[in-house]
Image (spheres, rainbow, N blue to C red):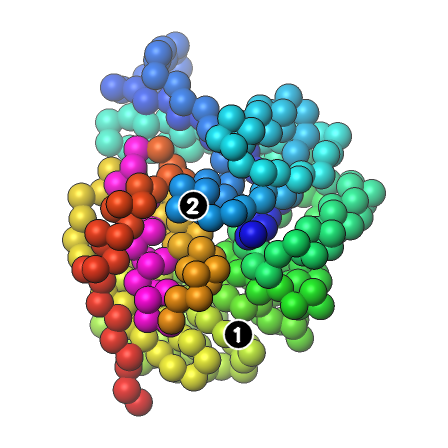
Amino acid sequence: MIVTVTMNPSIDISYPLDKLKMDTVNRTDQVTKTAGGKGLNVTRVIHDLGGAVLATGVLGGFHGKFIAEELNKAGINQAFTPIKEETRDSIAILHEGNQTEILETGPTVSGEEKIAFLKKFEELLEQTDIVTISGSLAKGLPQDFYQKLVQVAREKEVKALVDTSGESLKQVLKGQVKPYLIKPNLEELEVLLEQDFSIEQLKDIQTALEQPLFAGIEWIVVSLGKAGALAKHRDRFYRVTIPTIKVVNPVGSGDSTIAGFAYGLTQAMPPEDLLKFCMATGMANAQERTTGHVNPINVQRHFTKIAVKKIER
């Protein structure tokens, strides 16, 4: 079983409009509301792939109940820690080819609620050997909270796959205990290292990933968007190139890549197949209208068209 962690979930609300009119009423009859948050996207995709998965994190209020009910409807196991404050909404207004977002910061998790979650987290790690940790932290949680989760996972001999950014990622990397995998995109890597990179100069990225900051991380997968990825596994580098596809909805493709990697680990895939599979899963998500879903048939179709080349030094 794979355990997925979402510490700041949301109800993702989509309002499609032909045109967004300012300072007046806008009406739509095509509203969609889904259980959102990067970790829940990972959860659904693992479920679509046929993997055994359990979702955890924190949920509160009527919004939290809605998310729990949506996961129940999908047949997804869950073990969330209840909190007093209301889980957030994330609103996307789709208009004239644009996407305008209104994102709530979300609830504040109390000290008692944090302790309750950590206790639950330790219990869940007894049932798994892979945990994914995705997205932002709710207010009230310290910036090094994910580092604490990585440390607990290591103590339980569980592989921790971390997909976060900014200060949370920086704190994870500063810790003595490293995650099994991180998956920054190029922009997130630039912010982390305060350095500009170019897809045309991959050697610069390779050199950056050999800094002591990244020592001890088994896998680093740097997403390059349409250009594929650059991956580091121990002391080996791989260049992953992907075919061009018709994109329907790219949101959640990074989360789906994490889901594909976690599922691939459960199948004991060799390194090159693991890279193909996780990238194929991300591509398959981009072909679905609903965020955080894949068609396994599309995953296998893309898998055969992805090239992975070991970079010789």
Task: Confirm whether the magenta stretch covers residue 280.
Answer: yes
Q: CA distance from mark 1 to mark 2?
A: 28 Å
**Which residue range is magenta in the image?**
271-289
Whole-percent x, y for residue 181 in the image: 50, 66
Q: Does residue 236 appear left or right of residue 301 in this picture? A: right
Tell me residue 153's x, y (percent): 66, 63
In the figure, is residue 90 to the left or right of 244? right
Q: Residue at x 62, y 28 (%)?
A: 64
Q: Amino acid at mark 1?
A: Ile
Disc 1 element: loop
Give the labeled residue for mark 2.
Answer: 50
Whether residue 143 is visible to the viewer of this picture, yes or no, is no
The answer to whether residue 294 is left or right of residue 227 is: right
Report the side of 89 relative to 284 (left or right): right
Q: Which residue does the image show at 39% across and 15% down from the upper left?
A: 23
Q: Position of residue 309 (x, y in %)?
A: 25, 75
Residue 292 lies in what quarter of the image? top left
> Magenta stretch mostly in which secondary structure?
helix
| Residue 249 in the image: above or below residue 118 | above
